[in-house]
Image: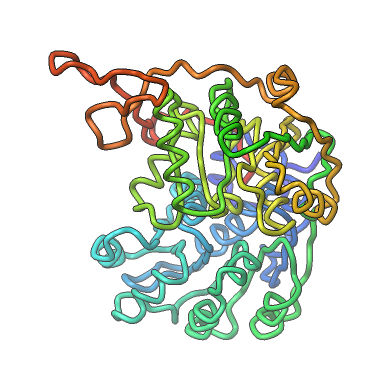
């Protein structure tokens, strides 16, 4: 058995990994870390959850802990990630290891006052984790300089391409030394990602894990026929009332907000995330969902990539995704690291042909079950229950909304029922995580 100690990592870093209960590297880590430690450019191909964060993070920590000191506004390590959540998650995973190695790590993302980032960069930062837009803003204001970067990692490069970030990524890479070490991780290495590889990487070695797919043995798929829109709304509420962590996907931001309101009206502690939510709101939702205090997360596709939360036992496509790749990435939020999980797609009659083609393209065998005619099947597959009907206020509201089923507003002398607020990250249980 190969251990992290065998890979030649700094002793304090190995001790911190051991303290977290992490001894044995995942396959991509065992294969790629030695090449990265040797200074090679590395291409890592694999889905979220395959161990990529440590694959680029540990060599970066090793290199920087042995190569001098950083200066204010001039990090020596740069990590670019497509979403705020992923950037924050990377920073949280690597921070204890950086501390053990005597390094400082900082994340800079949109949705946070840039003045806070400017102030933080006024002190030396060894590793900067950034979304491309916020990094470019800081460069434009001459508060960030990339000429001292020795090692750069691009995480979810294909997702950055899908989101149109590659022009910004190229501008940022052009500001780093041409002879710097580069590590790129992506689910796919074709198209625009390949152009990035050809332009910026030097004789890279490639390491791959299994591609994104929805046919893992521990993941089951179902198409649940749910009649019309009103019947679907009842099905959604009953599924959301189940035990366990559930992610529900909608196509639009408005759809997310509307669905959260509906669920909270019937007593389900659900929160939503999408691109228009403020960073504090998004962080609170992720923290609450990670800890289990908020059991239901309603999201647009922003949460389908890069968010690695353990214990998600059910993914629900309320709105079927537009294309099969999105189906695979959404579905990949469950059945992670050998755990089991289910994926259900809610299908109204007029969506039947569309979803049939979607599943075929995704290579998914998803039995079709009419849960309106056979409601017991909904309970069997998802653990659906009847919501308690005790309305919860929306975040920031004092009075609970009234359930459409006829619930009454509390009298002025009554206190509004409190809603559980997500705990901060310091209260989260420590988990042995894929990184």
Q: Residue at x 64, y 82 (%)?
A: 200
- x%, y% of residue 38? 70, 67
Image position of 112 (left or right of 15) = left
Vertical placement of residue 241 versus 250, above or below: above
Vertical placement of residue 36 versus 221, above or below: below
Residue situated in front as seen by the camera: 341 or 178: 341
Q: Residue at x 60, y 31 (%)?
A: 231
Q: How is the image coloured?
A: rainbow
Q: Residue at x 34, y 53 (%)?
A: 278
Residue situated in front as seen by the camera: 54 or 218: 218
Vertical placement of residue 183 versus 292, above or below: below
Is residue 430 visible to the viewer in this orientation of the structure? yes
Vertical placement of residue 234 versus 315, above or below: above
Image position of 372 (left or right of 301) = right
- x%, y% of residue 429? 49, 27
The quarter in which the N terminus is drawn is top right
């Amino acid at each position: 058995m190969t251990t992290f100690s065998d890979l030649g990592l700094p002793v304090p870093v190995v001790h911190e990994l051991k303290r977290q209960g992490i001894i044995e590297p995942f396959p991509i880590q065992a294969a790629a870390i030695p090449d990265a430690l040797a200074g090679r450019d590395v291409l890592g191909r694999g889905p979220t959850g395959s161990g990529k964060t440590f694959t680029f993070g540990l060599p970066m920590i090793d290199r920087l802990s042995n190569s001098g000191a950083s200066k204010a506004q001039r990090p020596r390590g740069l990590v670019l990630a497509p979403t705020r959540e992923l950037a924050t998650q990377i920073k949280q995973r690597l921070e204890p290891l950086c501390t053990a190695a005597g390094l400082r790590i900082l994340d800079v993302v949109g949705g946070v006052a840039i003045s806070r980032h400017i102030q933080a960069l006024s002190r030396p930062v060894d590793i900067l984790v950034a979304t491309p837009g916020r990094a470019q803003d800081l460069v434009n204001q001459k508060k960030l300089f990339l000429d001292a970067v020795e090692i750069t990692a691009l995480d979810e490069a294909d997702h950055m391409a899908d989101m149109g970030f590659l022009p910004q990524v190229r501008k940022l890479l052009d500001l780093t030394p041409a002879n710097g070490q580069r590590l790129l991780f992506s689910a796919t290495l074709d198209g625009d990602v390949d152009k990035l590889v050809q332009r910026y990487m030097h004789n890279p070695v490639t390491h791959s894990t299994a591609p994104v797919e929805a046919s893992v043995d521990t993941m089951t798929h179902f198409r649940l026929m749910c009649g019309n829109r009103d019947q679907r709304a009842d099905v959604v509420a009953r599924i959301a009332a189940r035990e366990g962590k559930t992610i529900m996907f909608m196509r639009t931001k408005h759809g997310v907000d509307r669905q959260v309101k509906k669920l909270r009206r019937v007593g389900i502690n659900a929160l939503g995330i999408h691109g228009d939510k403020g960073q504090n709101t998004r962080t609170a939702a992720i923290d609450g969902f990670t800890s289990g205090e908020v059991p239901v997360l309603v999201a647009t596709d922003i949460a389908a990539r890069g968010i690695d939360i353990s214990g998600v036992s059910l993914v629900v496509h309320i709105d079927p995704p537009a294309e099969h790749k999105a189906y695979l990435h959404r579905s990949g939020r469950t059945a992670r690291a050998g755990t089991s999980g289910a994926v259900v797609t809610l299908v109204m009659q007029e969506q039947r042909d569309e979803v049939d083609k979607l599943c075929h393209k995704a290579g998914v065998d998803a039995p079709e079950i009419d849960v309106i005619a056979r409601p017991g099947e909904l309970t069997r597959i998802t653990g659906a229950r009847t919501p308690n009907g005790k309305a919860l206020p929306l975040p920031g509201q004092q009075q609970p909304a009234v359930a459409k089923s006829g619930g009454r507003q509390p009298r002025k002398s009554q206190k509004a029922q409190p809603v559980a607020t997500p705990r901060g990250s310091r209260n989260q249980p420590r988990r042995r995580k894929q990184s």
